[in-house]
Amino acid sequence: MSNLKAIDQGENDEDIEIYKKNKPFWITTAIAAEIGREELLGATFRDIVLHIISLLFLSIYIFSQISVSEYYITTALKNSFDIDEDGDFFKIISAEKFWEFLEEPLTDALYKTRDSSITDTESMYMLNENRVLGVPRMRQVKVKSNSCQIHGYFRRLFVSCYSLFSNIGEDRESFGLKSGTAWVYSDADKTESLSYSGTLSTYTGGGFYVDFSTDKNDTEDLIGDLKENLWVTRGTRAVFIDFSIYNSNLNLFCICKLVFEFLPSGDVKPNFKFSPATLLEFQDWRFWTLRFLLYLFGIYIIFCLFEEFREIIYFGWNYLAQFWTYIDLSVIVLAFMMIFGTEYMRIIVPSYLEKIKNKPTAYGNLEYPEVAYSTFKVIGALLLFFVYIRTFKYLNFNKRMAQLNDTIKQCSKDIMGFSVMFFVAYFAYAELGYLVFGSEVKSYSTFGFSMFTLLRTILGDFDFEEIHKANWIVAPIYFLSFIILVFFVLLNMFLAIINDTYSDVKTDIAIAPKEMELIDYLEQGFKRILLKLGCRVRTSQPEREPQHNTNINKIRDALVKCKFEEREIQMYFTRYEIDPLKELKKKDIDSFFEKLALEDEAKKAEQQRVVKWQDFQRQDAKLIELERSLATLGQRVQELLTTIENIQGAKKKT
């Protein structure tokens, strides 16, 4: 206790020097949290500055990759093919409608002539300003005629059966004219097309394909031949029309895919995908500025990587028990992936464009660069998201700023336990809606759609009339019971748990002792710099004697390290009459240590009064021996009394 007193009062310089020698050389925010308040504020300030700078650099780089022109070019393409909720594109529900679309709207959109005032070489243009790279390609995938089984009752009525598309049931046999790529199967290595995930199936990149011509009349003749020779059959499961365009005004590519799924039910489900992409960049001052910001961010990520290695060495297996560990690792991994993807795109894109340039009458395939661009675009978005979330990590130095983190941390177990009951009820209503309304209502047609529909119902977005038409008996009971049980009861219990925990957190903050804030730390550091520069700084009396205020913080830090809770620390302060909000004087510190010394002396005196175990055993043995002697003496006295009684009886008889 005397050593503790000497350290706290700053009287033992040797212990302070030992502490400085054993202090970790490289302190991260997580390590500083276990050392002391001043170290935590110093590490936090350093990390906040680096984090804000890196966040600024990354935000500039990511947002510069996206242009509002991407939205307008996709909107223009939709209008060109009449793609909207009420447009003709989604009215294609049969093979006849499909061929009508190929013969007029498609060819009219792809082969529009440019204005006579424009002197560019004649080629395929869309909306006058978007040049089609190469030529479009139309590809279909098929299934075998025996890809499913026919029930025995109907085998006389149906000879063939065509199932949903699958790799096992895919038809790769030549058909029709049996010559040319339109009638002979080509695998994905030859077509260089990627798989596509549709409504009911995932379709491979192979199939039967035909490339359009650069001339509109030749393309119309080609479509007429395909229609006449029955290119689309009962086994057809999907037809893809792929082409790529480039807008020189915007320096923007757009990879387009029109999809027509021929479902086993007999109808056609059209779909589309327009993917704008900036695959080429001008190497001007803007390009090199953004690339410089990206590389600076990469240097910061390398610094973060070394910090993670430092924490692994310091914490060991406890490193995996920290929540922010996984956020930091996600940022590091995504950052390296984005930087790698940026350089990778710069290498592969020119090779694909060179192929299109050398073969202008072949299919301009940019599917793979588009997928890579979209993937790295999503990676960049996720990276920026996690970097923004990471900002909460550096707000924990201030208790008021960390209210959200503390609330979530304290109520996480209660929420996880209650979530089990909530999701049991939620899944029960989802499967009920799927089974009862799934055959008639689109929003309940799959179990996943049913779950999202219920989520929208919780948020107030629902269509009761739709499910009421599907089943007028079950719908009211289903809807009302869900609203009462899930919305009014279970959801409000979630809010009650969070609200109760938040109240406890605010109470803990209110009764917590005043700690050094970041602004105080910065002010002290600024004054130290002024003093080193030779400037005289006038300080108030409390600032000239800061050691007493820091002592209570050290006591508090020591109790926290010993796993004491906030209420236990307050009981400790109450026992020794310590007021955390009161400015302590030297006499208060001396009184505190005198009480501790008196407690030590009282414990020693109490220990001296306690009988040792060996003495207790010795006294116990003596008592046992005394009891035996008394028992023997009592027996002899009894015998003596018996003898006396016998003698007296004999005398009376005589």
Image: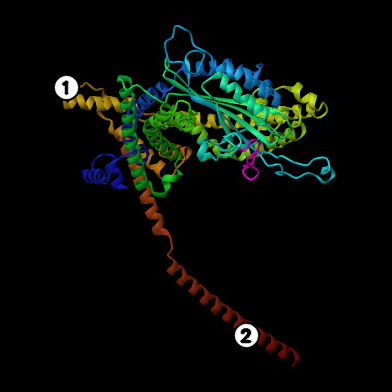
Q: Which mark is residue 501?
A: none
**Which amino acid lies under the numbered mark 1 shown in the image of this protein?**
Cys
User: What's the magenta bit mostly, secondary-structure-wise?
Assistant: loop
Foreground pick, 330 / 325:
330
What residue is shown with label 2? 640
Mark in the foreground, 2 or 1: 1
Instruction: Calculate the distance from the C-alpha at mark 2 to the C-alpha at mark 1.
Output: 107 Å
Element class at badge 2:
helix
Note whether residue 68 is visible.
Answer: no
| Residue 561 % position (x, y) | 40, 43
Q: Which residue is mark 1?
A: 535
Q: Is residue 176 magenta?
A: yes
Residue 375 seen in this snapshot: yes
* Amino acid type, callout 2: Leu
The colour scheme is: rainbow
The part of the chain drawn in magenta is: 165-178
- Work out whether residue 99 or residue 614 is closer to the camera in this orientation and state it: 99
Q: Is residue 350 magenta?
A: no
- Position of residue 507 in the picture relative to residue 550 (left or right): right
State left or right for residue 162 relative to residue 595. right
**In terms of image quadrants, where is residue 207?**
top right
Give the residue at x 28% y 30%: 546
Residue depicted at x 51% and y 73%: 623
Identify which residue is drawn at 49% across, 12% down: 128
Residue 6 x/y as whole percent: 27, 43
Q: Residues within 10 Å of mark 2 (few under 14, many from 20)?
A: few
